[in-house]
Each structure stands twice: as structure tokens, then as C-alpha cells.
Amino acid sequence: MSTSTNDLPKLRQLLRRKLSELDRMLEPAFDRQAVFPGRLSVSRHRCGRPNCRCNDGELHEAVRLAIQFKDGAANRCLDDDGVELWQPRTEAYRRLRDAERSFRKWQKDIVVLLDSIERARRSCDGLSPEDRKRPLR
């Protein structure tokens, strides 16, 4: 992609816009909410009792906390108090991880933008005609 000095104002404007995204993107890092690397889900199942309503298709529901340990995974069934305790923590964790992913993408975009600005600002003034023929990095 070739860039010229005519592109500089547009590239700088884009850089300013990207910088203004940074505060909003990193907001979850400044939260004080405790985080927990788990995920809540609702499971539906049959209990196996012969006369239960779940045999007619009305399945039982349970809220489960999925936990990833270094040595494996575990699921824990939660009651209402458990959901109140774990849901804010797992959601805060998800927001923090989303912020990290967004930041990594933002960082790549900034590097590409800075490279474009560098190419637009390059000057070969003072180089010999022979050196000008050689491609720059």
C-alpha cells in the first residue's frame, strides 16, 4: 500500500479516533468488581423418576457454574444465593477478557496505522539516485 503526504491528515485523524476509543475499551480494567474465571449456564435434564413431570417433556432446570482449573474442569450446581454470588463475578471476568481481546485488535490496528504514517512521512531527500532505486524497509 503506497501512501503519500496527502494522506497524512486522514491518517492522523484516524489515529486520534483510535486513541479516543482506548479509554472506553479499557473501562473494565478499572472496575472494582471481583472477577472469577468461570461461566454460568442453565442445564435442562430428566431426573429419572418414573412418575415425574420431566418424563412428559417438562425438563428440570439447574444453573451451573463451569470452572476451568489447571488440572481439569468442574461443574457446580448453584442455588439462587449461589447465582447471586457468582453471576456478577463471571460477568466481570467476561467483560475484562473482552476488553483484552479488543485491546489486542486495537493494538494491531495502531501498528498498521503508525506504519502508514511512517511511509507517508518518508523522505529520500539527500540520497543518491543509485540509492533511491533500492527499496527501503
Image (cartoon, rainbow, N blue to C red):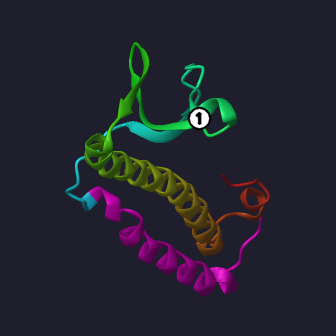
Residue 135 in percent (x, y) is at 75, 54
Residue holding disc 1 = 53
Q: Is residue 5 magenta?
A: yes
Q: Nearer the viewer, residue 88 or 113?
A: 88
Secondary structure character of the magenta stretch overall: helix
Q: Going 65% across and 29% down the picture, which residue do you hit? A: 55
Q: Going 59% across and 74% down the picture, which residue do you hit? A: 121
Q: Nearer the viewer, residue 131 or 103?
A: 103
User: SS for tag 1?
Assistant: helix
Please state which amino acid type lies under the numbered disc 1. Arg
Rendered view: 103 above or below 42:
below
Residue 11 in percent (x, y) is at 60, 78
Q: Is residue 109 magenta?
A: no
Rendered view: 51 above or below 4:
above
Q: Quarter of the image holding residue 120?
A: bottom right
Residue 35 in percent (x, y) is at 28, 45
Q: Residues within 10 Å of mark 1 (few under 14, many from 20)?
A: few
Residue 83 makes an appearance in the image: yes
Residue 126 makes an appearance in the image: no
Specify whether 19 is left or right of 135. left
Query: From this viewpoint, which residue is outermost toward the left?
Result: 32
Q: Going 59% across and 35% down the picture, which residue do you hit? A: 53
Give the magenta-colored segment's residue range.
Answer: 1-29
Q: Nearer the viewer, residue 106 or 34?
A: 34
Rendered view: 122 above or below 136:
below
Query: From this viewpoint, which residue is outermost toward the front?
Result: 51
